Every structure is written in C-alpha cells, then in structure tokens.
Image (tube, helix red, strand yellow):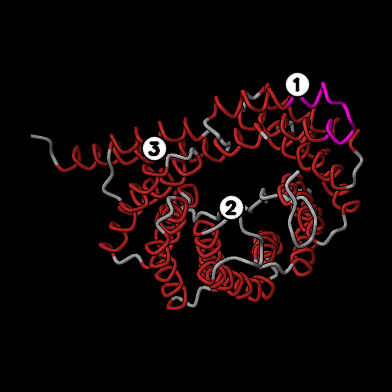
Amino acid sequence: MPNDNQTVHVHYRMEASCLDLALEGERMCKMGDYRGGVSFFEAAMQVGTEDLQVLSAIYSQLGNAYFHLQDYSKALEFHHHDLTLTRTTGDRLGEAKASGNLGNTLKVLGRFDEAVVCCQRHLDIARELDDMVGQARAFYNFGNVFHAKGKSICWSGAEPGDFPDEVMIALKKAAEYYEANLCIVKELGDRAAQGRTYGNLGNTYYLLGNFRDAMASHEQRLLIAKEFGDRSAERRAYCNLGNACIFLGDFEKAAEHYRKALQLARQLKDLAVEAQACYSLGNTYTLLQDYERAIDYHLKHLIIAQDLNDRIGEGRACWSLGNAHTALGNHDQAMHFAEKHLELSKETGDRTGELTARM
Amino acid sequence: TPCDSQSGQPRNLRSEHFEMEPETMETKSLTEYFNKMHMDVMMGMR
C-alpha cells in the first residue's frame, strides 16, 4: 500500500504530466498547428486531471482546435462538455465563454435558434459579471448568428434589399447587434474588434440594400486593417468595397478595389482568393464593356480553377469567356468555351448551367 | 448575358461572394493558469 507521501507524489506527477501535455497542445495551436494541438490535448485527457479548471481549458481549446479544422461536430462535442463542466462547478465566467463558443459552432452548423440561446446566456452572464468585453463579444456573436440566418433563408436569385420579410428582419437584427457591439468596443478603444464589426456590418448593410452605409463601413474596416498591417483583412475590405461599388454603378472604382484585392491575394499566396478576384475583375470589365481585359482576367481565373481542380469555377470561367468572345464577334472561340461550359455543367450536375450552355 | 429587367445590368455579374470576418472564439489560457499557479506556490514559500 502506498503511503500518503507516495500518493501525493503520484498525483503531482499526474497533474504535471497532464498540464505539460496540454501546455504543449496550447503552444502548437498558437503556432497554427491545430492537428498537432489536438493530439497533445487528447493525450492530456488520457492522462487525466483532477483540476477542473485545467479540464475546462482543455475541453475549450480542443473545441476551438476542431472548429479551426472545420470538424464542427467534434467542436460541438467539446464545447458542450465545457459548458456542462462549468455549470457543474459554478464557474460563471467559464460558462459564459463556453456558451459563446458553443453559439459560434451551432451557427456554423445552421442551428440558429439554439445558437441564439447560447448568445443570450453569454450576454446575460457578461452583464451579471459587469464584463463589458464579454458583452461586446456576445453582441458580435448575436450579429453573426442573425446575419447567417438571414442569408440561409433566401439568398440566391434575389437582389440585396429585396428579400422576403423574414430575411430582412434577421438582417436588421444583425445590424442592430453589430451597432450595439460597436458602441462598446469604441468606448473600450478596441480597434481590432471595431475592424471586425465594421466588416460584417458592411456586409449586412449590403444585403439590406444600403450600399452607401456598406461603403462607409468597409472604408472603416480598410482603415483599421491598414493600422494593424493585417493584409488578409485589407484584402477582404477591398473585395467588399468592390462589390458595393458594382451596386452603386461605379464600375471603374470597383475595378480599382478588386485590383488591390488581387494584388494582396497574390502577396498572401492564396490561390482560391486570387481566382475570386480575377473572376470579379473579369465581370467588372464586362460591365465596362472592355471585353479584352475581361477575357484576360477570366482566363487567369480559368487557369487557377484548373490548378485547384475547381470544376464549378472552371465552368463559370468558360461561360464568362464564351460571353466575352461573343461580344467581340469571335464566334469560334465563343463556341469553344460554350461547349466546354456544357461539358463541365454536365459533369458537375449543374442543371441551370447546362440549360444556359445549350442556349 | 441575362439582364436585370429594371437596371439593364447583367444580374449575374454582381458578386454574391462577399467576405465575412472571422468568428471570435473565447479562449481559456493554460499558460496564464500555469503562471498564476506557479506564482501562488512561490508566494506560499516566502
């Protein structure tokens, strides 16, 4: 039988080992290696711990790692474990954080009503604890849930600002929550949070058909992204500004924004977003009736789509190239791309694309 | 190119692709917890 000292020693070793493994998991996640992080957190759980705060942090970080890896059912499982644990121990701040993470995960899974319940719990506890940062974050999450809900109900086919009432109500709620968040983060002087909110608020105004306010929000987002030297955020802002300019009929300005987005996508070596910027530029030059340039960008888009084995992207590029060549009277080229588009539409099961191609 | 009947602009040329900002996930830092625990032990030893 081990004596008391030995038992304490075994416990100390076990705790140290679990915490060591979890700390390594945390370090790896911070470096962006979420798979590695998950392995260490899983190993830490295997060792086990009697320290419930450590266990809560492991559940929470495992949930976040799976969220980044886009394994949302696993993320849901661990954030749920964390919520149950923090409720059992009466850790109110921990419960608020678990609710926030669970809400974000439920939103991604399209379970909006459950997500709203989590956001409300996050907000209620933050208010109870007089935690302004927590309240601001809950408002931001609320905004994201209502924005996603609005988009999920009706998106394709309808024009921004002209959606069914249910969509417009959800989008207006999203805007209200983002505005409530902005009031707090401005007071707190949190520029990074302001940047994120301006970006999403701009997109919400865009969907509501309020393009002037969308432009103003995205300009603020761009300004803050530049302050932080955050090139990904800068690229996002240019892309969104380009979209708003198209709706305002300012195609030259839209092309200018999309060109900047393209330049940043290349600097960031992100092929998928480079392809998107080329596609947007191709469409913008079509609107400007500069078909030669449109062809140039649609060809660039086509090459990247082929590299990425993105058959839907390839189909879109071919369809656009067919139209641009038709406009220039290059009938052979137009026919070549139309045939290619038909072939790709059949392959991807795109019935609308197939019908358009046959026209 | 299919056109919007009201504006005369090609509807499909407007972008349906807009860029959302990332979600903000809450974090429970083990490093902070470890440092605090370490500090508490050191204070207890004084």
Q: Nearer the viewer, residue A336 or A114?
A: A336
Q: Are marks 3 and 1 on the same chain?
A: yes
Q: Position of residue A189 (x, y in %)?
A: 70, 69
Chain of the residue where label 3 is placed in the rendered structure: A
Image coordinates of residue A356 in percent, x first then y, are 65, 37
Q: Is residue A136 visible?
A: no
Chain assignment, label 2: A
What type is the residue that disc 3 sits on? Phe
- Name the residue that disc number 3 marks: A41
Give the magenta part as a residue range.
A324-337
Is the C terminus of chain A in the top left, top right, bottom left or bottom right quadrant? top right
Circle 2 residue: A156
**Both marks 2 and 1 on one chain:** yes
The amino acid at mark 2 is Ser
Q: Chain of mark 1?
A: A
The mark nearer the N terminus, 2 or 1, is 2
Among the two numbered marks 3 and 1 on one chain, the one whose residue lies closer to the N terminus: 3
As helix, strand or loop, the secondary structure at mark 3 comes to helix
Is A96 one of the magenta-colored residues? Answer: no
Question: As drawn, which residue projects farthest toward the left?
Answer: A1
Query: Is any part of residue A162 visible from this angle?
Result: yes
Q: What's the CA distance linking mark 2 and mark 1?
A: 28 Å
Disc 3 crowd, CA 10 A, few/some/many (<14, 14-19, 20+): many
* x 76%, y 38%: residue: A279
* Dominant secondary structure (helix, strand or loop) of the stretch shown in magenta: helix
